[in-house]
């Protein structure tokens, strides 16, 4: 499946950052006209387009959110969806012999894994995802005194380590990076793809159960919300508001030239990414 994924092609999907000019060639009817060099074409009296070569090895950085709420599930944990996405993208990067980094963070702990190219590194990161202890006291980086317990502190950290010319995948269920100045700085120096991971229930309130009442428990505050799943009016209102929030967040990221992809537990991860990068 990874071989068929057209490994490494995602690097040219944004801003052409990793494409370098190679030579001029005669324009073919099916090619994109935006690469025609009109000055050279006028001089040569024929339509010439720029041919690019791709830098085959790039830096890929994974930001992996393993907060306790990623353990939420009705049929499949959001954490399992994150791991599935991570394996697909990571193995694709390894096939291309890219440099790969990772930052795994929860509300209580985090782990920064430096760049490596070999395949064994994927299992080291996988082990760290599973070994993040949700009950540990908050830890700080002794050298930089960073406290990486939320997504905003992560973007601040990446800005301060001066990350640039890197393809960044952010895998999280959060939507609270509106007007984050560090995210804006990162988007100017890197290509970012924001992957929002949800349980389908969060967006639709649909379940496979026949019960009319659902109890939603917030793990951090222990607050309980009782949801009447047969109240179609309230359910429709919730779904509409949820769609608006996701769409608004997606549009905001697009203004920063940040790619956005919404994935839930019922989707085929391979299919969604394949069409996303081809588009």
Image (cartoon, rainbow, N blue to C red):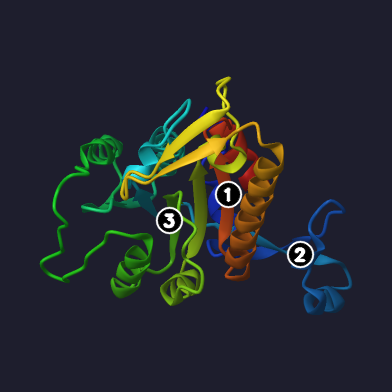
- Other-residue count near label 2 (Cα within 10 Å), few / some / many at <14 / 14–19 / ≥20: many
| Residue beneath disc 2 | 49
Image height of 78 relative to 63, above or below: above
Residue 164, numbered circle? none
Judged by depth in the image, the label closer to the viewer, 2 or 1, is 1
| Residue beneath disc 1 | 261
Q: CA distance from mark 3 to mark 1?
A: 21 Å
Q: Closest to the observer: 61 or 199?
A: 199
Q: Closest to the observer: 84 or 239?
A: 239
Q: Secondary structure at mark 1?
A: strand
| Residue beneath disc 3 | 58
Q: Secondary structure at mark 3?
A: loop
Residue located at (65% from left, 31% from top): 230
Is residue 235 visible to the viewer in this orientation of the structure? yes
Judged by depth in the image, the label closer to the viewer, 3 or 2, is 3
- Where's residue 35, x and y in %? 75, 66
Q: Closest to the observer: 53 or 234?
A: 234
């Amino acid at each position: 499946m990874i071989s068929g994924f057209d490994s490494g092609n995602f690097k040219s999907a944004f801003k052409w950052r990793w494409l370098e000019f190679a030579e001029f060639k005669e324009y073919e009817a099916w090619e994109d006209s935006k690469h025609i060099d009109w000055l050279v074409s006028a001089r040569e009296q024929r339509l010439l387009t720029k041919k690019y070569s791709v830098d085959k090895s790039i830096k890929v950085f994974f930001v992996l959110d393993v907060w306790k709420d990623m353990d939420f599930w009705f049929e499949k944990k959001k954490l399992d969806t994150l791991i599935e996405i991570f394996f697909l993208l990571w193995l694709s990067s390894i096939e291309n012999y890219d440099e790969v980094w990772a930052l795994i963070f929860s509300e209580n702990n985090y782990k920064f894994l430096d760049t490596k190219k070999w395949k064994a590194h994927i299992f080291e990161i996988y082990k760290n995802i599973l070994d993040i202890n949700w009950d540990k006291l908050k830890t700080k980086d002794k050298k930089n005194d960073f406290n990486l317990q939320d997504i905003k502190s992560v973007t601040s950290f990446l800005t301060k380590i001066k990350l640039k010319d890197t393809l960044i995948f952010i895998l999280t269920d959060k939507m609270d990076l509106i007007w984050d100045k560090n995210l804006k700085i990162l988007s100017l120096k890197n290509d970012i793809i924001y992957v929002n991971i949800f349980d389908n229930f969060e967006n639709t309130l649909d379940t496979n159960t026949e019960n009319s009442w659902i109890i939603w428990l917030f793990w951090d505050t222990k607050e309980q919300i009782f949801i009447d799943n047969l109240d179609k009016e309230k359910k429709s209102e919730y779904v509409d508001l949820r769609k608006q929030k996701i769409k608004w967040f997606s549009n905001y990221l697009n203004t920063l030239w940040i790619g956005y992809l919404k994935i839930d537990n019922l989707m085929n991860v391979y299919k969604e990414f394949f069409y996303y990068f081809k588009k």
